[in-house]
Image (cartoon, coloured by chain):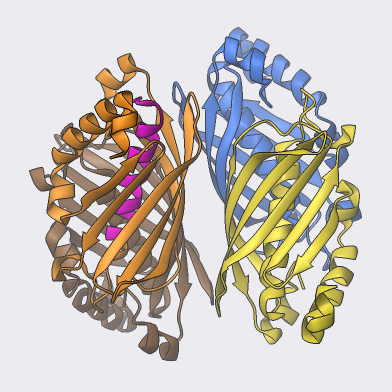
Chain colours: A brown, B orange, C yellow, D blue
Amino acid sequence: MRTEQDPAFAEIAAHIHTNVGKQGFMNLVGAELSDLSRGECTIAVDRRPELLQQHGFFHGGVTAFLVDNATTIAAATSRGQPALTAEYKLNLLSPAVGEKLICRARVIKPGRQVSVVAADVFCVTDGVEKHTATALASIAMLNEEVATKTKSPAA
Amino acid sequence: MRTEQDPAFAEIAAHIHTNVGKQGFMNLVGAELSDLSRGECTIAVDRRPELLQQHGFFHGGVTAFLVDNATTIAAATSRGQPALTAEYKLNLLSPAVGEKLICRARVIKPGRQVSVVAADVFCVTDGVEKHTATALASIAMLNEEVATKTKSPAA
Amino acid sequence: MRTEQDPAFAEIAAHIHTNVGKQGFMNLVGAELSDLSRGECTIAVDRRPELLQQHGFFHGGVTAFLVDNATTIAAATSRGQPALTAEYKLNLLSPAVGEKLICRARVIKPGRQVSVVAADVFCVTDGVEKHTATALASIAMLNEEVATKTKSPAA
Amino acid sequence: MRTEQDPAFAEIAAHIHTNVGKQGFMNLVGAELSDLSRGECTIAVDRRPELLQQHGFFHGGVTAFLVDNATTIAAATSRGQPALTAEYKLNLLSPAVGEKLICRARVIKPGRQVSVVAADVFCVTDGVEKHTATALASIAMLNEEVATKTKSPAA
């Protein structure tokens, strides 16, 4: 358990889980925050017909949702500061086939005002991962006062 | 009715509506293809608790989904060619409040291989639109053979 | 003269011109800050063999340089605050032919921490402009103390 | 010498070196194609006052130029096909100090129509590298006929 050696992070993690639990869209999509550590976040979702496009692949919008959420949460973990997606770029590399989508985000450069976070999305078929998308995000790091007013999406 | 003067486009539009109707994720989100013309596509979605994040704003993932779908469809309309999102960049400009989200995409530069499409997302409160996000996308234009094999998301 | 009605901007503009004049790379490229107003900046450069690639078009790197500089400066004009390019995305739309390149940047959304700026680049042949590139940038807005320490590129 | 085991690549590499040698802007900047292999390209440039901005850092435009050229060339090496920058996103992570800038690009996903290429830029001080920028690019892969007409920037 990673949080045992890092009580400050345990508190941040609990706070993030609470917030993510309140996201209606996270619940609608059925995604799960499967791993969380300092500067890293993994979100995964199982295949369901409701998540697909007309040819039976995961819809690009599902991939984008995972990227949006995972990058912001990864940034929020790094210093326990509220965070807000400023922007990201997403390249779709191959059709998102298979039974599961996994998005792994990691902070490349933590910042006082802006943190830069990379994310890679994999689709899983019979346990084998394939790289289906890659993204690069800038996350605005808010101070507490600003966060209270603007109600940031993560932490 | 825009398709009356453009029978070729009427066929393209019908084909797009059929394909979009088969998108499980479009139905899950509850979005609607509200306008379609050569080089342009508008998709809108009404506020529901399932589309929000923890502070009651539309989730950034909903905005991204609208952008993904609208840009690809806009590219598909311009020449009736199958199209596939290659990549996009999305800047979130302000919290997506209000009762409705509208994404308007327009082709900036049609291309043989890649079309460039811009999109703007507005949130609507009491009928007043606010600019909440802006995006720039590259859409891969497929020829029919390739499309059959890779099963593109739009058209 | 736009600065006559806006003495505060006149000071900002003078400061920007001084800073840009100290940019070795601006001088090497031979670009000129041709227009400056609140939230807007235009930079242009005439064709010279040193700015081209192997087929006689302006090199993409010249286009990128104009975008980088014009977007940061446009952000700096909007509130007189030091500004620093955080990131941008650049789509090249067509070969940059002709005798001149012009980049026009305009602030889409001024922000306390991040301003969003769009830029379009045109190439000019016999006085006729062609759209050759489009870009979307996030500019970090620094407070004075930070700026002194990090020495931002514009203003 | 990597080309000894790969005669087809040796020919591609020679062709690329010839083309890059004809780039006026590459010569003006004084950058050097320092490493080239299948799917990878490294370009470096030494510090000179002409490459700096007003505070003595490498100008962001120099970083962008390295990214533009290295990503396109990396894509061109992977299959020997002409290549053309379609778009890229560039995040500047820290001030580009030091005596040298190095950009390393690598193909993430080769494609028939579009190849996706990542690049990282490092600045070097007393032999120690610091990560100063990261980028993600989409490169249009041209067939020979198209290339002849549009005169692509690399290969």
Q: Is residue C11 visible?
A: no
Residue D94 x/y as whole percent:
64, 64
Q: Is residue A103 visible?
A: yes
- Count numbered badges in the picture: 0
Asked if residue A116 lies in the magenta stretch, the reply is: no
Front in this rendered view, residue A114 or B19: B19
Q: Residue at position x 34%, y 26% from top? A: B80
Residue B56 x/y as whole percent:
24, 77
From which residue to which does the magenta span run? B62-82
Q: Residue at position x 22%, y 70% from top? A: B52
Residue A87 x/y as whole percent:
46, 61
* Residue B41 placement, left or right of D114: left
* Residue A1 placement, left or right of C43: left
Q: Main secondary structure of the magenta part?
A: helix
Residue B94 x/y as whole percent:
42, 72
Tell me the quarter of the picture where residue C32 sits: bottom right
Q: Residue at position x 76%, y 26% from top? A: D20
Tell me the quarter of the picture where residue D153 sits: top right
* Residue B126 placement, left or right of D111: left
Asked if residue B66 is positioned above or below residue C133 in the image, the reply reads below
Tell me the quarter of the picture where residue D31 sits: top right
Asked if residue C94 is positioned above or below residue D141 in the image, the reply reads below
